[in-house]
Each structure stands twice: as structure tokens, then as C-alpha cells.
Image (spheres, helix red, strand yellow):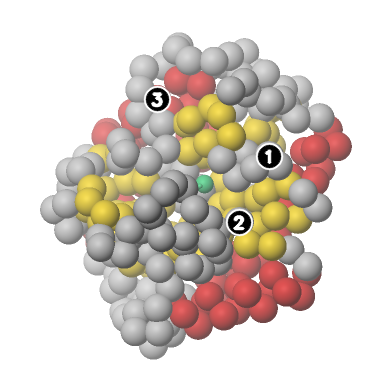
Amino acid sequence: MLVQLKSAKDIEKLRQANLIVSDVLDICQEMANPGVTTWDMEVAARAYLDKVGARSAFLNYAPGYGIAPYPAVLCTSVNEVVVHGIPSKSMILKEGDILSVDFGAFYKGFCGDSARTYEIGKVSETAHRLSEVTRISLEKAIEQMVAGNRLGDVSNAVQTWVESQGFSVIRDFVGHGIGTAMHEPPQVPNYGPKGRGMVLNPGLVIAIEPMVTEGHWAVEILDDDWTVVTKDRKLAAHFEHSVAVTENGPLVLSRR
Ligand code: MF3
Ligand code: CO
């Protein structure tokens, strides 16, 4: 399947969807305190979707035969959970946790997708550093979203920075093109050599989502079919933005 470049009109609609996503992540950030459950956030996110007339991109998402459809509008991934943690009334946040919240929504036919990692109260030095290194890795990737660069420049920016800080990049999950579908080509790995891969042209829109671990990058999936945890049960962090290449450089659609 070919990579579809987006018109200025498409990008405006992607912007609207992504602003809704950003609002929901703001709401979750506000709630990210000890004693709150990840289900409380799920309820708040559903209420916001209803209010603005948008549709979840995650709820009932079914990647393949024999895998249970995703049961929530948020992914809430705590500590050793890398991505796709399912919101739960029994997951009560506590001081020292790190929580990544991932949210996607369709609005006027276009999809927005973004994620952030939050610190719950005061966290360990390592947890804080992991979260910051991951957040900064996404900024470094965004800087590479310039016409004439290659996709490998984006991937390599994440890997080089993360590994220079002593952390590891997840191999088994990648970012993706995004448009009228949540997952479009190209795949966007967070590792690989620079100077390789497709040339970035204005109109390319991708969701860049570094997933970074404190220890080894190997992961396993729990019996619920979704929850991705580090094999060594060390911490993981995740940030994501939907980003367009424009004539004037990178445009971060999921940031106000
Ligand atoms: N941001 C993730 C992704 O792009 C979230 C998907 S959760 C799912 O793949 F349930 F929709 F799969
Ligand atoms: Co995504």
C-alpha cells in the first residue's frame, strides 16, 4: 500500500481531531494523582468524546482474528506496562508510579492520536529521567520532520538519543502513518540507520511514538491479549504526537 500525502484541507481536519485528543490528554494529566483510578480517566475521556461529538479510535479496535477487540477509549499503561494497558477500577494510581495515557479519536472523518507519560506525585530519579528522555526523544524526532530528510532520520534521532542516555528502544511496536484511518503506511520504527527509508515530502503525516525502557527492550503480552509489559518488568515510558511535514517544517498537530 502506498503512502498517501495529505492536502492542506486534510491537514486542517487532522488538526481538529488532534486538538480533541490533546484536550483529553490535558484532562487526564489534571487527574493524574494518587488515589485516582485509570477507569476514572476512561469515564472522563468518554464524557469528553460525547460532548464534542467525536468517536474513539481505540474502542472495539480489532487488529486480527482471535484477538479480543480493544475494550476502552484510553490506553493507560502503568510502570512496567509499555503500551495498551486497559483502564481498570482496580488500578489505583499511587505516589511514585509513572502512567502513560494514549488516546485516539475520529472527528469529521480524520483520526488524531497522541500519548503522554505522567508522573504520579514524586517519582524515583530513574522514573523521572526515563520519562524526560522519552519526551525529549520525541522532540528530536519531530525536528527531523523536514522535507528532503528521510524516514530513517526520524527513527535514528530517537534511537541515538535514547541509547546515549542508557535506555532502550522497543522494537516490537512502531509509529505509523495516520489520516482517515488510524494506521496507515509507513511504519515508523524508533530505531534504525539514518539516511535510509522514504524521502519526507510536504503532506506526509505520521504518528511518532517512542516507547522506551529502563532495561532491555524485550516485551511480552499478557493474557488479556493487549497489555504489553517489559520482560524484565523494568519501567517503560511512551510519548506520541501526530506530526505533518510542511513547506515550513514540522507541524505538531496534537499540540495546542
Ligand atoms: N497509539 C496506539 C497505536 O497507534 C494505540 C492503539 S490502541 C488500540 O497503535 F487499541 F487501538 F489498538
Ligand atoms: Co499511535
Judged left or right of residue 5, residue 68 is left
Badge 1, how many Cα within 10 Å: few under 14, some, many 20+? many
Q: CA distance from mark 2 to mark 3?
A: 28 Å
Which image quarter is the C terminus in?
A: bottom right
Q: Looking at this view, name the residue that lies furthest to the bottom.
A: 35
Say what secondary structure mark 1 lies in.
Answer: loop
The location of residue 43, given as percent across then percent down, is 57, 80
Q: Are marks 2 and 3 in contact (CB under 8 Å)?
A: no
Q: Is mark 1 within 8 Å of ligand 2?
A: no
For residue 116, the mark is none
Mark 1: amino acid: Gly
Mark toward the viewer: 3 or 1: 1
Mark 3: amino acid: Asn
Q: CA distance from mark 3 to mark 1?
A: 24 Å
Mark 2: amino acid: Ala
Q: Is mark 2 within 8 Å of ligand 1?
A: yes
